[in-house]
């Protein structure tokens, strides 16, 4: 990976609300372009205030906010320019959605940017398709579910094609499946080059999702760094009234009991923890007998259709099926494919492969390469040879039957 570049940064930010409450106390952070950043902290830590600074909704009392190393001047033209590049989705979509129809709401931003009508229509169509709401154009947004409203708010930002997405508590008030789908969309947008910044008090979400964590409390930054580093510092977490992620807590207890070897970097997932257990078992000479690893097929919707997917399933060559991305999930829904996995798909398929089962991942775009790369990296790191094969319109014949 080449050198990183700060896309958003803050220098010595201080901000007080009109009632005198000081929300930020000398905040300095630098966020890398193309990264996934989680601002983490308890209620009142200053996360939301900092996010509003990034979008120039609030102006600091003192200090400065910079976009691509250039300070925001807060003139009308400067604010207009920053909002073209930094799009914000508020915690409560009802605070952001105001138009009588979904189309009008999503079109509001592009219209205000001065786009011609043809471009507005095209960008609105693209954004609604991306979030899985094609056909919703004439529907009143306030009649939608909480998850659908979140998607409308996200579509309204995507229609302006920003470089940075800033989302305040993106999974709040959503059921677990809807929350995972929102985070998967953010993963996909990041793969396409967007810098994604979220504010959350959910340490489990921040630990497994983010590249960088900014831990905040009482309007100050306590620590910034990779999640494995930030969530290893118990004293600072305690100060911020935050708990350890469950997988880190389990790892520490197992290491303390001598069940696994303590390492410099704790595991980020259940799969990584299981790998550590397997390595320890091999070192102790008590390696359990493993099944022959299963294969993972990856279906690129640009190259394969529903027929080839059904052929693969009917031949019995895949016991489990998962979908990554809105397009894949909509296709599965339209074709009445019964999904075993709709989130955490890659790791779940790897776990099944370790158990000797073969799986199929349906996805598209950059997610195809991400899935295949992740499987191959895991194989190289773990020594468990799992074959990843891209599926095209001619399904393989004679594969492993589970």
Image (spheres, rainbow, N blue to C red):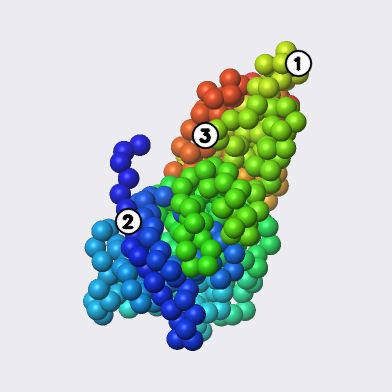
The mark lying in front, picked from 3 and 1, is 1
| In this picture, residue 16 sits left or right of residue 237 | left
Rendered-image quadrant of the N terminus: top left
Of the image marks 3 and 2, the number of the one nearer the N terminus: 2
Q: Which residue is mark 2?
A: 7
Q: Is residue 57 above or below residue 370?
A: below
Of the image marks 1 and 2, the number of the one nearer the N terminus: 2
Disc 1 crowd rating (10 Å Cα; few below 14, some 14-19, many 20+) is few
Question: Is residue 176 in view?
Answer: yes
Q: Which mark is residue 286?
A: 1
Q: Is residue 240 above or below residue 72?
A: above
Residue 240 lies, in percent from the top left, at: 58, 59
Secondary structure found at label 3: helix
Q: Which residue is mark 3?
A: 374
Disc 3 crowd rating (10 Å Cα; few below 14, some 14-19, many 20+) is some
Residue 197 lies, in percent from the top left, at: 45, 58
Secondary structure found at label 2: strand
The residue closer to the viewer here, 271 or 20, is 20
Q: Is residue 249 above or below residue 164?
A: above
Secondary structure found at label 1: loop
Q: In whole angstroms, how far apart are the C-alphas of marks 3 and 1? A: 28 Å
């Amino acid at each position: 990976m080449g050198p990183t570049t700060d896309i958003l940064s803050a220098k010595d930010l201080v901000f007080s609300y009109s009632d005198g409450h000081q929300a930020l106390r000398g905040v300095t952070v630098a966020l890398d372009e193309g990264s996934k950043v989680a601002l983490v902290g308890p209620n009142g830590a200053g996360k939301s205030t900092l996010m509003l600074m990034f979008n120039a909704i609030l102006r600091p009392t003192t200090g400065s906010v910079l976009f691509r190393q250039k300070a925001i001047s807060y003139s009308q033209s400067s604010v207009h320019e920053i909002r073209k590049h930094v799009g914000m989705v508020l915690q409560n979509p009802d605070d952001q959605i105001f138009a009588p129809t979904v189309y009008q709401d999503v079109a509001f931003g592009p219209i205000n940017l001065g786009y011609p009508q043809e471009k507005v229509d095209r960008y609105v169509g693209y954004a609604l398709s991306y979030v899985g709401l094609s056909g919703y154009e004439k529907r009143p947004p306030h009649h939608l579910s909480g998850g659908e409203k979140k998607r409308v708010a996200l579509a309204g930002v995507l229609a302006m094609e920003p470089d940075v997405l800033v989302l305040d508590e993106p999974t709040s008030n959503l059921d677990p499946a809807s929350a995972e789908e929102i985070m998967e969309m953010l993963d996909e947008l990041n793969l396409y080059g967007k810098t994604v910044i979220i504010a959350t008090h959910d340490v489990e979400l921040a630990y497994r999702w983010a590249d960088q964590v900014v831990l905040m409390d009482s309007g100050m930054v306590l620590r910034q760094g990779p999640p494995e580093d930030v969530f290893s510092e118990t004293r600072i977490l305690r100060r911020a009234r935050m708990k350890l992620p469950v997988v880190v807590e389990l790892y520490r207890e197992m290491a303390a009991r001598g069940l696994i070897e303590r390492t410099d970097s704790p595991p980020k997932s259940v799969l990584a923890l299981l790998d550590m257990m397997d390595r320890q078992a091999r070192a102790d000479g008590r390696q359990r007998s493993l099944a022959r690893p299963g294969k993972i097929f990856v279906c690129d919707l640009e190259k394969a259709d529903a027929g080839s997917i059904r052929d693969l399933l009917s031949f019995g060559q895949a016991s489990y099926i998962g979908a990554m991305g809105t397009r894949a999930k909509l296709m599965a829904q339209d074709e009445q494919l019964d999904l075993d996995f709709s989130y955490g798909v890659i790791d779940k398929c790897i776990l099944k492969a370790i158990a000797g089962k073969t799986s199929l991942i349906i996805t598209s775009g950059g997610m195809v390469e991400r899935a295949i790369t992740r499987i191959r990296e895991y194989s190289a790191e773990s020594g468990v040879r799992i074959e990843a094969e891209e599926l095209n319109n001619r399904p393989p014949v004679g594969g492993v039957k589970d």
